[in-house]
Amino acid sequence: MAGSGRKNARAVDVFAYLDYRRFLDDWFRAAKAGNPRFSHRMFARMAGQKSPSLLIQVIAGKRNLTAATAESFSRAMGLPSDEAAFFADLVRFNQADTQAEQNQAWARISASRRFREARLVEGQAVEYISHWYYPAIRELAHRDDFDPDPSWLSRALRPRVTPAQARQAMDVLLSLGLLTPDEHGIPRPSEASVVTPHEVAGLAARNYHRGMLELAAASIEGTAAPERHLVAVTVNIPQSLVPRLKEELNAFQERLLDLCDGAEGDPERVYQAELALFPLSEPPQELDG
């Protein structure tokens, strides 16, 4: 194995990746650079696999890895136990069938100290979008009476969060630069924006909207009618109209933001306006036959 090129490939840090296929591609290229004779066939033998094209197909997204093949790939790459465990979590994250499975894998990935050291900002960005009270606290910071003390934040939010959750949220907001101290040392919202890596952008967005829709549902019974306003329409439309409706919703969102940004008076409460468009029936072709 000494001439396999694995030693050269050790420079490829698995903890810097969120896409295991990209890691495999970079690892193989590095191994090949260290030993021009290294091949997909050689890798297959090292991994105990019969198909010499398996690695090519996996990298191209044409084949998935099972738990067993992920383990054999880790052995072939000579990954230590902690890196092999992280690689297995990347496989689970990228191939998850449900949002719950993907969130479970993400929890293990983001808990890794070496991942946080390699991709701290990306991990915190996902954390910010995935928890409803992070952006809520950022908006609270517009108020004159804003107090960054976790106990105050816990009481100010509805529904309440624990002081520990509020403290973690403040740490992330400050670390991302979404809150910055003013001349009096009070954290205030900055102009910074949050960008999530494409590998987790979908998961973060789903977590955000799921959480906000759950809060909207809870407000039906938990919030007094004068404090909320829920509207909905059920319509039967041609599928071709959907893009136009999305454009209208986006334009309405912009009008709401302009209205809020131009409002006179001091900010007092944080509100969430949730606009949703989703089908309640199958398209005709799904019902044929």
Image (spheres, rainbow, N blue to C red):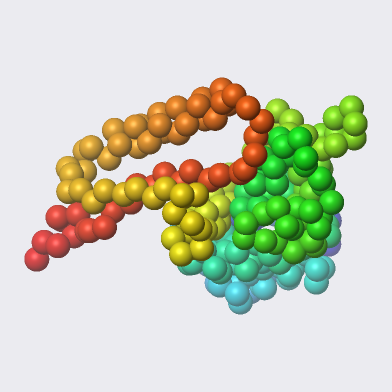
| Farthest right residue in view | 184
- Viewport quadrant of the N terminus: bottom right
Q: Can residue 64 be seen in this view?
A: no
287 vs 192, left or right, is left
Residue ID at (51%, 25%):
258
Residue ID at (79%, 53%):
152
Instruction: Tell which of 46 and 275 is nearer to you.
Output: 275
Q: Can residue 188 be seen in this view?
A: yes
Residue ID at (26%, 48%):
233
Where residue 270 sits, quadrant-wise, is top right
Question: Residue 252, position in %: x, y?
Answer: 40, 31
281 vs 41, left or right, is left
Residue ID at (73%, 70%):
85
Instruction: Tell which of 264 and 16 is nearer to you.
Output: 264
223 up-or-down from 259: above or below: below
Question: Residue 236, position in %: x, y?
Answer: 17, 48
Question: Residue 259, position in %: x, y?
Answer: 50, 27
Question: Residue 90, position in %: x, y?
Answer: 65, 61
| Farthest bottom residue in view | 68
Where residue 163 sits, quadrant-wise, is bottom right
- Viewport quadrant of the C terminus: bottom left
